[in-house]
Amino acid sequence: MGRKDEKRVDTDAKIKKRGKKKRVGGPKGIVEVLGCPPLSRFYYELVVGNGIGDDAVGDALAAFERAWEVRRQKAHDSATRGAETLGKECVPAEHLILGPFSSKQDWKIDWDTEPMTAMTWCWVGYESIRFCKPQ
C-alpha cells in the first residue's frame, strides 16, 4: 500500500475545504426555526334555516340556502384576517386558507305541533394556517 502523497499526481488540483461556511442572513440554526412553528386555527359559522306552517320544510330550506352564502363568507373573512399570535422572535412568511369545510346538514321537523315547525342547520368553516420564519 502506498502513501497518500504518492497517489497525488497533479499538485495543481484544488483541495476541498472542509470548514463550516458562514451564513449571511437567515436563521442561525435549527433552534431558531423550531421556535417559529406554523400556527393554525379553524374559523366556523353555524348556518340555520327555520320554517313554520304548512310549508315549514320548504321555508326552512329556502332560509338555509340564503344564510349559507352569508355565513360562508363571514367564516372566510375571519380566516383571512386571522388573529393567530406569532412568537416574539417570528415574522409571518406565508398564509394559507383551506376550505370551505362543512358538516352534514341536519334537520328537526315537528310534525305533531300546530303549526308545524322545521329547522335545518350545519357548520361551515375555513382553516387558516400561518407559516412563520425567524427574524
Image (tube, rainbow, N blue to C red):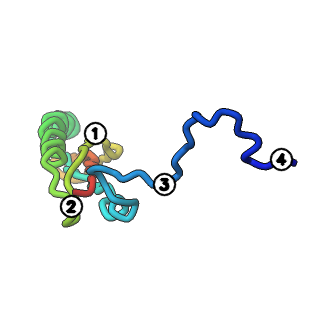
Which mark is first along the chain, 4 or 2?
Answer: 4
Query: Cα distance, mark 3 to mark 2?
Result: 35 Å
Q: Look at the numbered discs 2 and 4 and tell me whether their residues touch, using CB distance below 8 Å.
A: no
Depth-wise, is mark 3 or mark 1 nearer the camera? Answer: 3
For label 4, the crowd category at 10 Å Cα-Cα, with few meaning under 14, some 14 to 19 and many 20 or more, is: few
Depth-wise, is mark 1 or mark 2 nearer the camera? Answer: 2
- Viewer-proximal residue, 56 or 60? 60
Kind of residue at badge 4:
Gly
Kind of residue at badge 1:
Pro
Q: Which residue is mark 4?
A: 2
Q: Which residue is mark 2?
A: 86
Residue located at (72% from left, 46% from top) = 5
Depth-wise, is mark 2 or mark 4 nearer the camera? Answer: 4
Query: Cα distance, mark 1 to mark 4?
Result: 70 Å
Q: Which residue is mark 3?
A: 19
* Rendered-image quadrant of the C terminus: bottom left
Q: Secondary structure at mark 4?
A: loop
- Residue 101's image quarter? top left
For label 2, the crowd category at 10 Å Cα-Cα, with few meaning under 14, some 14 to 19 and many 20 or more, is: some
Depth-wise, is mark 3 or mark 4 nearer the camera? Answer: 4
Query: Cα distance, mark 2 to mark 4?
Result: 60 Å
Q: Is residue 41 left or right of residue 64?
A: right
User: What label does residue 100 carry, if any?
Assistant: 1
Q: Secondary structure at mark 2?
A: loop
Kind of residue at badge 2:
Leu
